[in-house]
Structure formats: C-alpha cells, structure tokens
Amino acid sequence: MLRFLYVTDLHGWEAAYEAVLDAAVARGIPYIVNGGDMLPKGSGILKAQKRFIQGFLRAHVARCQATGVRFYGMFGNDDLASRLPYWREVLAEHPCAADLTAGWHEWPEGLRLRGVNHVPDHPFGIKDWSVMDTRAFTPPAQWSAPILSGPEGFEKIPDLHAFLAGRPTLAERLAAAGREAPELSRAILVSHCPPAGLGLAVTGGLTGGRDVGSVALRGWIERWQPLLTLHGHIHESPEMTGVHTATLGRTLCHQPGQRGAPELTLSMVEIAGEAVRIEREVLAVAGSPD
C-alpha cells in the first residue's frame, strides 16, 4: 500500500504548506504532491515569487528533507515561468524534491507519477502556461491585455491567436507525455487543469456555471486509462457542483478544490493494488496567502 497527500492552489499560503507537512509527518506519510499554483500572486508578483521561492519554499523543502518526506511540485498558471530558475535551484539543493513536469517519476508498487502544468487559455492576463486545448480551440474573451513574464518584467503579446498557434497544444503535450511511459495502467497524472464534462472544472463568479475543463485531457484519459489523475485550477468547482471525484472508465479523477484561508483543503490518497481510496479533508489553518 502507498499513501500520499495531495494539495493544490496554495498561492504562497505559508501556514498551509506547514500544515500539510505536519499532517504528513504525524501520519507517517512519505510523499506530498502539490498540483500547481504554488506561489503568491497579486501586486509585485515578480519580486514576491522570487522572494517566496528563495526564502520560505527553500526552507520548507529543507524541512521536508529533514523529516523524511519527499515533495513533488510544479508551477501552475499563476506561477511565472521566469521564476523557474529559482525553483530549480531549490530542487538542486534538496534531493527530496522533484518537479512533476520533469518526466515520469517511478514510485514503489509499479506506480509512476508525472505532471502537466499547461492549461487551456483563460481570460486572465498572464499567459506563461496558456495553450490551445486542441487545434480547434477558440480562446475566450480576454479580461485584460495578454502578457508574458520575463526575468525583469512583463512583455505584451501583440497577437494572442498567433502566440497560441505557435505553441504545442495541450493535446500534443499530453500525447508526448503518454509516449514517454512504457505503460500507463499504474500511472498517476497530475494535470493542473481538470478534464471537461465531469463537474471538476465548473467556475463561479462572472462565468458561474461554465465548464472550462480540457476536452483534450478527457480524450487522453479515455484512451490511456491511467490509474489516477489529480487536478486543481478551478478552486471553487467542488463547491459549485458538489463533485470532487469522478470516474472515466477505470480511471479515478480527483480535484479537491481550494477554499483558502482559514480553511485548507487537502486529500489523502491511498493506493493498494488496483484500489484507490481518497479522503478529502478541510482543516482550519491560521494565516492567509500573502
């Protein structure tokens, strides 16, 4: 039997990071999987994300290593690609940590784990991880000017359609990930964006009730039938639909959502043979994301 904790969309919430690690240590769980949007957002995001990685996140991963817990993480759509070098420095310093997107990670009991952090384009400005879902994808109406992060600032994207057309689609990225693994029946895919049509990617707010899940990802799951897929991105979806776990064929798909301070949502995942059990929990946690 293998157990791990899954959490997503912490957005720099330091107290939540510590609470997840405390839970892992207290329960004797050797792995934490973080599904993206790890870093703070808002004003001054370039400096804030660099500071968070070099300060808190470095110390947190060091604590994981000291307590014998392995940490698997990846950037999400609000985590600036230009901050990746700082994250990679932390990984190089701590053998206990790994980036989910760096290929398939082999786990005990024949399990393998991989992340895909690109998402179908959204209305928000930062496009570092935005792609077309398929070649037939139409980007949504934009709420702000599209931008791309650089080492010292942001640059405007003059033609969003041309920009997206020049990138591999999510379908193409997923296909490549599938080809990298010799066998996927015991695979765990962590995709920041959930699949479409399962009630795992339904928005609230101005676009309330809209399913923004990935059609490409759903097709990939239906074709390859991995053991488990894990998601995030649409924090409110489980509250909108009442659904956090669904099945596609033999594949279990889970999106815990994230309520945010003072309520931390995390999931304990237990795998025994072909059986997958998920316990979604909400913990009271002091503090809030910066």
Image (cartoon, grey):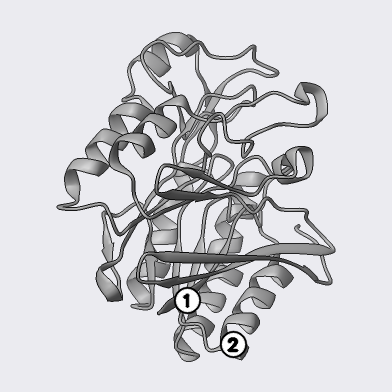
Front residue of this view, candidates 90 and 51: 90
Furthest residue toward left: 182
Q: As displayed, is residue 103 above or below residue 135?
A: below
User: Looking at this view, is 167 or 280 the one in front?
Assistant: 280
Image location (x, y in percent) of residue 236: 74, 42
Write the residue at 68% across / 32% down.
Answer: 202
Q: Locate residue 137: give its quadrant.
A: top left
**Marks 1 and 2 close (CB-CB < 8 Å):** yes
Q: Position of residue 1 (x, y in %)?
A: 40, 79
Q: 95 or 210, which lies in front?
A: 210
Residue at image coords 56%, 76%: 60
Label 1: how many residues lie within 10 Å, few (<14), some (14-19) or many (20+)?
many
Q: How many marks?
A: 2
Q: Quadrant of the C terminus?
A: bottom right
Per the rendering, the mark at residue 186 is: none
Q: Residue at x 25, y 52 (%)?
A: 184
- Mark 1 residue element: strand
Look at 47% across and 90% down and name the residue there: 66
Looking at numbered disc 2 in the image, what kind of residue is underneath it?
Arg
Q: Position of residue 214 (x, y in %)?
A: 49, 29
Above or below — where is 132 with respect to 57?
Answer: above
- Circle 2 SS class: helix
Q: Label 2, on which residue? A: 27
Residue 287 left/right relative to 64: right
Q: Earlier in the sequence, mark 1 or mark 2?
A: 1
Q: Which residue is mark 1?
A: 3
Q: Quadrant of residue 90?
A: bottom left
Q: Is residue 144 above or below residue 237?
A: above
Callout 2 environment at 10 Å: few (<14), some (14 to 19), or many (20+)?
A: few
What amino acid does circle 1 point to? Answer: Arg
Task: Give the side of residue 114 with respect to residue 254, left or right.
Answer: left
Q: Is residue 271 left or right of residue 224?
A: right
